[in-house]
């Protein structure tokens, strides 16, 4: 059966394919009603899709129906706008999974960009610069429409106007005006890095705490984030740095645990395997005491600790822990 080149037929085939992807079984009468055609036309269109290598099984029942099955190879698929946004975000953050997926993800993004309709391409462009830090964390829920609005403002170079809920308080009435520059995923949360012209400084906001106003503000010229690397700048802000420097204290130790158990928790540090049961870890922190506490998180023996300041901090930590364990208790 030849596949028709008629625009109406092609459009109907895409609509039929989209319906078949939304649920497991479709009765033939239901498909006919949704497409506003006869059941005979549905049968012909099912045949056309089968000729295009879509595996569609007929189902038994009073009305009969159809089920789209997995095939030996992936056929062309049809996605709605929200699905495209989800795919783009997943591809942009593929590196955070720790697998070697960056190159494949970039190729997939390139393919989608070339085929994407213009109305959606303009909205997605702002999300193409999204990056993710390779660290874990329970994800927060963010409205995709908000991510798109922020991405569009970044692409267009337009000031964002929004209310903001600071930790522990409700929404603030004051409208913030920020020049948005970078959208990043870090430890399960989406963050906006922006510049406040009013205060003449860079600021970081959690996107799930933003309440966007209906209209954006003035246009602005792009700026370079301190240090030039948005991801490093964001990590530095969490440790109290201005993003241009590094940790005040760096140390290393042999952690008596396999690399697979250690690597997911080193953040911007490094970890390498020594053998099946030991890993060499190098970490930074704002103080030697906090670094000692961080290295103690794995609850396994540590050895070959450097430098001397870190060993001294471990001694102080051990003394405090001993005092806490042996001191008097007021709990009865």
Image (spheres, helix red, strand yellow):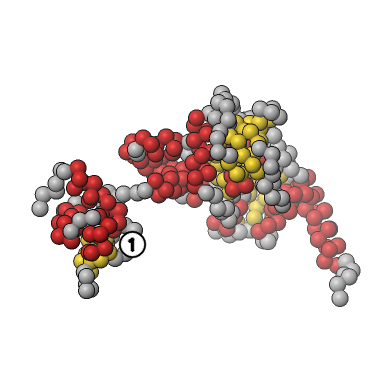
Residue 219, position as x, y percentages in the image: 55, 26
One can see residue 260 in this view: yes
159 versus 294 height, above or below: above
Q: Give the residue at x 54% y 49%.
A: 142
- Point out the image quarter for the C terminus: bottom right
Q: Give the residue at x 42% y 34%.
A: 122
Q: Give the residue at x 76% y 44%.
A: 287
11 versus 63 height, above or below: above
One can see residue 270 in this view: no
SS class of the residue under badge 1? loop
Residue 184, position as x, y percentages in the image: 55, 41
Extreme top residue here? 221
113 relative position to 311: left or right:
left
305 relative position to 24: left or right:
right
Q: Which residue is mark 1?
A: 23
Residue 37, position as x, y percentages in the image: 20, 56
Q: Give the residue at x 58% y 56%.
A: 138
């Amino acid at each position: 059966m030849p596949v028709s080149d008629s625009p109406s037929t092609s459009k109907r085939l895409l609509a039929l394919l989209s319906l078949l992807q939304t649920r497991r079984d479709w009765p033939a009468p239901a498909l006919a009603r949704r497409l506003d055609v006869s059941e005979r036309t549905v049968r012909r269109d099912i045949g056309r899709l089968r000729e295009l290598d879509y595996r569609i099984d007929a189902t038994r029942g009073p009305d009969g129906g159809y089920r789209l099955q997995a095939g030996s190879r992936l056929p062309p698929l049809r996605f709605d706008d929200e699905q495209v946004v989800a795919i783009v975000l997943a591809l942009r953050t593929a590196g955070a999974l720790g697998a070697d997926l960056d190159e494949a993800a970039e190729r997939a993004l390139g393919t989608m960009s070339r085929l994407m309709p213009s109305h959606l391409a303009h909205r997605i462009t702002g999300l193409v610069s999204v990056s993710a830090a390779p660290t874990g964390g329970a994800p927060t829920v963010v409205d995709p429409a908000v991510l798109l609005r922020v991405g569009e403002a970044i692409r267009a170079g337009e000031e964002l106007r929004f209310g903001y809920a600071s930790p522990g308080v409700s929404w603030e009435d004051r409208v913030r005006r920020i020049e948005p520059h970078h959208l990043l995923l870090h430890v399960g949360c989406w963050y906006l890095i922006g510049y406040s012209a009013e205060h003449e400084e860079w600021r970081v906001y959690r996107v799930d705490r933003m309440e966007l106003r209906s209209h954006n503000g003035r246009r602005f010229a792009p700026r370079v984030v301190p240090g030039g690397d948005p991801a490093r700048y964001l990590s530095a802000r969490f440790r109290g740095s201005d993003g241009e420097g590094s940790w005040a204290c760096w140390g290393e130790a042999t952690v008596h645990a396999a690399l697979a158990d250690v690597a997911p928790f080193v953040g911007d540090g490094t970890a390498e395997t020594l053998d099946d049961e030991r890993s060499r870890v190098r970490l930074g922190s704002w103080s030697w005491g906090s670094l000692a506490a961080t290295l103690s998180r794995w609850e396994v023996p540590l050895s070959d600790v450097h430098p001397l300041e870190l060993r001294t901090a471990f001694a102080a930590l051990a003394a405090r822990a001993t005092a806490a364990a042996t001191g008097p208790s007021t709990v009865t």
